[in-house]
Amino acid sequence: MTGEGDASKHDEAWAMEFIDRLNRGTQEAHERRDALAVAVDEIAQGFTQVGLKPWKTGRKSPAREDMKAPDVMLGDRAEPAATILRYESAVNILSAADQLRGFAVLLRAEASLMGAVSVARGIFEACLWATAVIDPTITTDERLQRALTRRLARLSAGIRLKDMLDDGVTDADQFIENDGDIDDEHGTNRDPAKDIDDIVRYAKDRGWPVKKGRRASEITPLSIDWLSENLERRIGIEGYAWTSGSSMAHGEHAADTAS
């Protein structure tokens, strides 16, 4: 039998050891988060380079086929199909890069679980849009329909933004052209409403059905839910975590999202 003093010393030693384990665990968690943030920053830099630098096209690559496609006649101007596909993909690649940098900041701050989840969802969606536009499993015409559908969505969003802010904003993706490394043949100093009309007219001339969506016209139906189910190289999590009905999509049920 031990005395009361011995028991008290034992409890104190156990408590100190437990606190020490907690502190070590916290420190290890900080280190893991920091390492993850560094990796995310590196990925963001890689995405930025992919978005801005010229792409190499192999002899049998789909991109080479896109370069052979006839120019797209939009009103009084012709735009190469490959340029449209490159630009619309790069818009989303650079968006993903920007959001990756924001994700790294949130990781280091350790202040907002749902904020990090929301940014992660934005990264996932931007990557899906970019992949959809340059999907090698479909034809150049199908890629072009997707790219022009995404352009219609962005131009319509730019008009809504201008109407909301009323500060002279003319396009929703000026951050790309300001870099100067990507030809933007549709953005600065152009009338987005006219560009929308030109795209719709071109699609109808090609015999492509154009549907008036809730926010923008669509040449081909595209949604994150459909893309997450149908693009190649699915890994499984997108079947629940990123669909429109999941808690992550709506910022609900933080405890479930955390687990």
Image (tube, grey):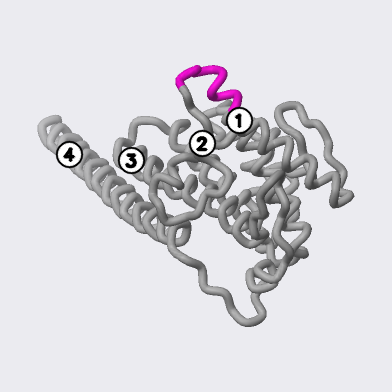
Spot occupied by residue 233 in the image (x, y as percentages of width and height): 66, 63
Residue at image mark 4? 16
Secondary structure at numbered mark 4: helix
Q: Nearer the viewer, residue 9 or 65?
A: 65
Q: Please, which residue is most extreme toward the left here?
A: 5
Q: Which of labels 2 and 4 is toward the front?
A: 2
Rendered residue at 87%/43% (across/down): 209
Q: Which of labels 4 and 3 is toward the front?
A: 3
Secondary structure at numbered mark 2: loop
Spot occupied by residue 77 in the image (x, y as percentages of width and height): 66, 50
Q: Earlier in the sequence, mark 1 or mark 3?
A: 3
Instruction: Magenta stretch: give its range.
Output: 159-167
Residue at image mark 3? 105
Rendered residue at 70%/60% (across/down): 71
Q: Label 2, label 4: how many angstroms apart (C-alpha)?
A: 67 Å
Residue at image mark 1? 157
Residue 71 falls left or right of residue 258: right
**Tag of residue 189:** 2
